[in-house]
Amino acid sequence: MNTPVISSDKKEKSTILVWKIIQILMWLVGVVIVFCLLFYPVLGIHLFWNILIPVAPLLLVVATGLWRNICPMASTALFPRHINISKRIKLTTKHQEVLSLVAIFSLFLIVPLRHIVFNTNGFATAVLILSIGIVAFTMGIIFDWKSGWCSSLCPIHPVEKLYGNKAILKLKNAHCNSCVKCVTPCPDTTLNIQPFSSKKSNYQKISKVLLIGGFPGFIWGWFQVPDYNEIITIENFIESYKLPMVGLFTTSTLFFLLTKILTPKKQLLTNLYSFAAVACYYWFRLPALVGFGMFKTDGMLIDLAPYLPEEMIKGSIIVSSIFFFWWLVLKKQTKKSWLIRPVYKTI
Ligand code: SF4
């Protein structure tokens, strides 16, 4: 009589084991990348900025839950909880909103620094990753489950919410073994989570306009700036921020005005802006990866310019834009969350 229970229990345990193995492997990949950044900077920069980071937006669009389960930084932040040394403090909704706003500001402050230092300096990138790791680990020591980092302060989390509202995979939550409602709403387990879909506080309103509205312009502006390889001047510093901020201001102002005019179509507007952001990213990033970038060597993984016709690259960015338009704008909502909610903790 007990056979089905035992076999489903076994299946559950083996599923968790598989996820744990993948998490450890991904964490080791992170360690290898940091090692390369420190001791083999050219290789480390390729691995991190020219392979991992260009894949990330696509992964966030099509499989946000997968990324939430295997992200090495998430494993770092949740390690204290897994080994029971977290103080498990509950973050209030207000503090969560403030941290989310800080995450958005961090994103807009850190990314332009890539042109100044991180894109070309492996040591600086390693220090950045290690510093973020220390913050993530500390948040995990203080706050319960994903509330302190993965669902609030992580600078990638706002982008997960922006891109990941059409989940097709609903995977097991490979971190939380029971749900203590550490965040409300939980981004992992809420159906079709929308960026800032909960109560509208002022923090959320600002976050919404800055992230949804500002991200496409910010990305466009970022790609208009070259990497500075030599001694950095104050002018370089200003240039690195100028166009991304002009873009951010322009598209966020337009978004703000459109939300006033198109009140019933806000979801469509959000989807169009998500599409514009990710399509713009790949519009510039795909050519740059293979030697067709605006600034020849910036962000180049391999130089295929002598071998590939430019039309082929143009074709690939048009195809990628059509794909993202279909996925983010035309495709129906799937009524799925990124991850399956674990059972609620009862004591
Ligand atoms: S599933 Fe529950 S415990 Fe895990 S992150 Fe979501 S709200 Fe927190």
Image (spheres, rainbow, N blue to C red):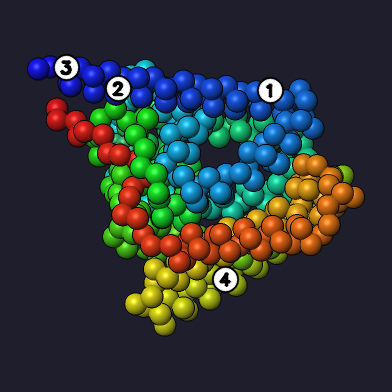
Q: Secondary structure at mark 2?
A: helix
- Dot in front, 2 or 3: 3
Residue 60, position as x, y percentages in the image? 50, 47
Q: Give the vertical position of 3 relative to 292 (above or below).
A: above
Q: Are marks 2 and 3 in contact (CB under 8 Å)?
A: no
Q: Where does ligand 1 appear, by image quarter?
A: top left
Alpha carbon of mark 2 to alpha carbon of mark 3: how far?
12 Å
> Which residue corresponds to mark 3?
3
Which numbered marker is on residue 35? 1
First in sequence: mark 2 vs mark 3: 3
Q: Kindly identify the amino acid type of the residue bearing the numbered disc 2.
A: Lys
- Dot in front, 3 or 4: 3
Residue closer to the observer: 53 or 117: 53
- Dot in front, 2 or 1: 2
Query: Residue 339's image quarter?
Result: top left
First in sequence: mark 2 vs mark 1: 2
First in sequence: mark 3 vs mark 4: 3
